[in-house]
Amino acid sequence: MDYNIVCIPGDGIGPEVVTEAKKVLEKVADRYGHRFSFTDILMGGASIDVHGIPLTDEAIRTAKAADAVLMGSIGGDTSTSPWYKLPPEKRPEAGLLKIRKSLNLFANLRPAVLYNELAAACPLKEEISEAGFDMMIMRELTGGLYFGERKTFEEDGQLKAIDTLTYSESEIRRIAIKGFDIAMKRRKKVTSVDKANVLDSSRLWRKVVEEVAKDYPEVTLEHMLVDNCAMQLVRDPKQFDVILTENMFGDILSDEASMVTGSIGMLASASLNDTKFGLYEPSGGSAPAIAGQGIANPIATILSAAMLLRFSLDLDKEADAIEAAVKQVLKDGYRTIDIMPQDEEGKRQVTQVGTAQMGDLICERI
Ligand code: NAD
């Protein structure tokens, strides 16, 4: 089949890691008889340098016409780059907010996987890390406390501040459907996380999630309070398959889950709308300090490309092939600098490689 993928190389290490992900997609196309046509658009600092703004309407139109978008990362060194002397709405990050809004990306997906070979980087006790884990955090991205009405005012001689947490049934239903759909492609378990012992918005969340669950009889649904979930993530992370939660809880829990994997260069992510369309990107930033040196880890972007195949193009076996190739390359002892073992004995057992070599090694295993 033919697919049209828009790429946003962006800034810093972005262009280097996107090049490797494209290389891997080309290999998948060859091996499985597909054709991917790639169109690059500018965003972030790269767009400011050419157009004076971080994202043009023309670039958005191009992205909308694609089957999916693959992004590197945007932004520069926030203390030295001239991009950060511009007003906030013209800075690189404004491009990211604009594209998320224009494409109606309301569902954020962040996998947290502990690879056996990288277990030493996991900060959890050995008896927990050696069991491994593989979970997907599905976070609502456009509602809740971060988008509710807020104000700061004076009352009885002191300042008071109010933030509001609002969710409608339809906002909850659409993210719950996404969560159950994703669970059907995985181990068929959804843990819906809320604070239903206190919050009305959580009680509504629970009610709607239970309604949606009726359409997915093969999926096991459990509810968990957010405080308990924060504990369970470090006590027994392997119990989780899909964690489905609202915006702020997801913000906090997804960072906690990434931390327990121990390696930022390995973390993929996706933001989806209510069609198959999505934007796929590594969870890390543009790492300006190591840009241009050929040492960045491309695996997070390559795994983001695998998510693109799975969730936007329904090419599950092709996505499996990329994920298996990444596992194999780690098993064969290849590491970029960020995932090198810290001790001398560990270093002797592996080979350090650069960005392009890591891309080549993964391609060879597809
Ligand atoms: P960062 O993620 O870029 O870097 C944090 C640390 O992780 C650095 O030590 C960096 O070298 C390392 N790192 C990150 N990705 C790596 C990779 N693939 N391989 C090897 N090492 C890697 O975070 P930061 O320094 O806080 O931010 C730098 C810039 O990135 C800022 O302009 C920020 O706004 C931007 N940013 C962009 C996005 C995005 O595009 N979605 C996300 C986060 C930060």
Image: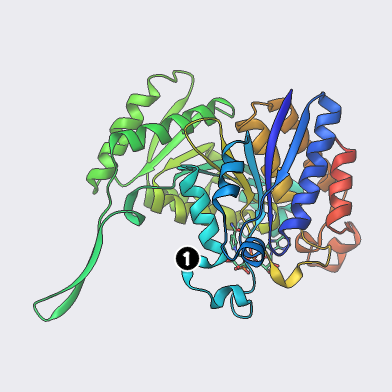
The residue at the far left in this view is 156
10 Å neighbourhood of mark 1: few (<14), some, or many (≥20)?
A: few
Horizontal side, residue 82 vs residue 289: left or right = left
Residue 129: x percent and y percent? Answer: 64, 50
State which quadrant residue 304 falls in.
Answer: top right
Tell me residue 288's x, y (percent).
70, 69
Q: Residue at x 85, y 28 (%)?
A: 31
Some atom of ligand 1 lies within 8 Å of the CB belonging to the residue at label 1 = no
- Would residue 268 be seen by someone viewing this image from the given angle? no
Q: Nearer the viewer, residue 346 or 270?
A: 270
Helix, strand or loop at label 1? It is helix
Q: Is residue 176 left or right of residue 13?
A: left
State the residue position of label 1.
Answer: 89
Q: How is the image coloured?
A: rainbow
Which x, y percent locates residue 220?
46, 26
Residue 306: horizontal and vertical position, in percent?
A: 70, 38
- Above or below residue 207? Residue 96 is below
Figure quarter occupied by ligand 1: bottom right
Is residue 50 visible from the viewing direction of this image? yes
180 left or right of 53? left
Q: Nearer the viewer, residue 288 or 101?
A: 101
In the displayed structure, would residue 224 be above or below residue 286? above
Q: Quadrant of the N terminus?
A: top right
**Amino acid at circle 1:** Glu
Look at the picture and state if 78 lies above or below 149: below
Specify the quadrant of the image occupied by residue 83: bottom right
The residue under the point 52% across, 66% down is: 90
- Quadrant in the picture for residue 312: top right
Quick one: quadrant of the C terminus? top right
Residue nearer the viewer, 297 or 171:
171
